Image (cartoon, helix red, strand yellow):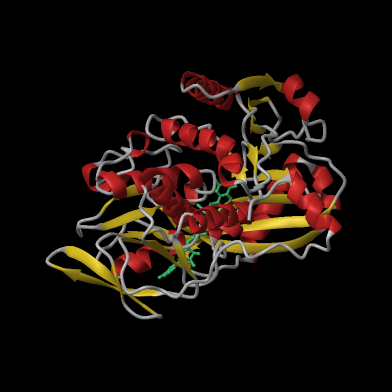
Amino acid sequence: MAFSGWRILREGLTGNKGWGPLWRTPEPRKAYDALIIGGGGHGLSTAYYLAKNHGMTRIAVLERGYLGGGNVGRNTTIVRANYFLPGNQEFYSHSLKLWEGMEADLNFNAMHSQRGLINLFHSDGQRDAFARRGNAMINQGDDAILLDREGVRELLPYLDFDNHRFPVYGGLLHPRGGTARHDAVAWGYARGADRLGVDLIQNCEVTGFTIAGGKVTGVETTRGPIAAPMVAMVVAGRSGQLAAKAGMRLPIESHVLQAFVTEGLKPVIDHVVSFGMGHFYISQSDKGGLVFGGDIDFYSSYAQRGNLPMMEHVMEAGMSLMPMIGKAKVLRSWGGIMDMTPDGSPIIDKTPVEGLFVDAGWNYGGFKAVPASGWCLAHLMATGDSHPVAARFRLDRFREGVLLDEEGTGAQHNLH
Ligand SMILES: Cc1cc2nc3c(=O)[nH]c(=O)nc-3n(C[C@H](O)[C@H](O)[C@H](O)COP(=O)(O)OP(=O)(O)OC[C@H]3O[C@@H](n4cnc5c(N)ncnc54)[C@H](O)[C@@H]3O)c2cc1C
């Protein structure tokens, strides 16, 4: 089933009876050439690019719940390529380019909207840091414009510019940054992978690994054993638990990150805006709700719901930056389990078990990475070599001390 304007018109005129399911519901086979554990954004994009770029179609995605029910459908949808450090820069730049062609490639509307991201700064020191970041982004081939206070006022007149504690000094505008509809990204990749022959198996939890002579030979699941010479763990917040079943201890802690959505409002926030003096970021969805979030909860947890102290912290940051937000009613909030690494950067690598791969450690920034993560993990699995733009996302960098500490906050998870 292909989507087009003509198809929508025809279905609209004939009672919308011709739409079919977006993907099949196959029974798991006994053996595959490769298994992807986790039907989130990263697992689904990996399966899609394994099939599309490398011609591997005897593959399955094993998902313990339903496709897109994890973080990929729980995030605040910000898509950007504004990283500073070599290693991160080229990866996120590659990802944004894939985003820009993704909907046409998948023939699926993911509502990708490049409305511009503005990171605010509130001191001279912060201005210098953002100017450096902007220059790094431009050198990488991406876009960045340093706005002064009046430049910000023109675009975001509703901010509290004269807040005595956090006056707005200016902002770094990244015009190609923006948002997308998060679960549509999962659905688009799922449909794309299914059309290329990938089996998407839902309600199938991986409970163990079969490993012989240091090589992976398959997995144990709630729907029986499945054999495969290649297995990828792509389970975000559950990475530590899953890797433990293969006898590994990953440098990852799981924390809750909350998101909040208000009642639908008339268009008021045209960009994605982030506060430089508190962890607070906001955009407005196409349905009109203000979508915002802040810090992770400061202790480890596998709960997919948050707690009141962090909620209060986020609301306070929002009120400091844009007091008008106090008039809006919050309708919904939820949490997702974040896979936090000590340096805040991800891992896409082989593991000490031959044939077993890991793609994890996305912290709270893995939505924008969905296309490039799948692209690079598929490359690694199919060729045996790291893709050049993901070459620094090594598992052993924590042992070797070659960290990618973008935020400069070291191993303090609560400071990321
Ligand atoms: C509130 C919030 C806001 C965020 N905001 C942003 C943002 O604005 N921008 C951004 O770039 N990123 C953001 N993120 C981060 C981003 O959502 C994640 O980094 C990314 O989605 C993680 O990758 P994933 O999509 O593959 O994870 P998930 O969707 O969580 O996929 C992992 C899947 O693995 C499955 N699984 C786990 N264990 C097993 C098992 N044993 N067997 C089978 N399946 C298993 C899970 O059920 C899940 O579906 C945010 C996250 C949250 C929670």
Q: For the image shown, how many numbered marks are present on the structure? A: 0
Point out residue 381 in the picture as x, y percentages from the top left corner.
Answer: 30, 50
The one nearer the camera, 141 or 240, is 141
Residue 269: name its quadrant. top right
Residue 144: name its quadrant. top right
Q: Is residue 387 left or right of residue 319?
A: left
Which residue occupies the extreme left position in the image? 213
Residue 385: name its quadrant. top left
Point out residue 409 in the picture as x, y percentages from the top left corner.
Answer: 43, 42
Point out residue 416 in the picture as x, y percentages from the top left corner.
Answer: 48, 46
The one nearer the camera, 91 or 27, is 27
The one nearer the camera, 378 or 347, is 378
Question: Does any portion of residue 14 appear in the rendered image?
Answer: yes
Residue 68 versus residue 288 in the image, above or below = below
Question: Does any portion of residue 36 appear in the rendered image?
Answer: no
**Residue drawn at (63%, 56%) of the image:** 1
**Residue drawn at (22%, 65%) of the image:** 216
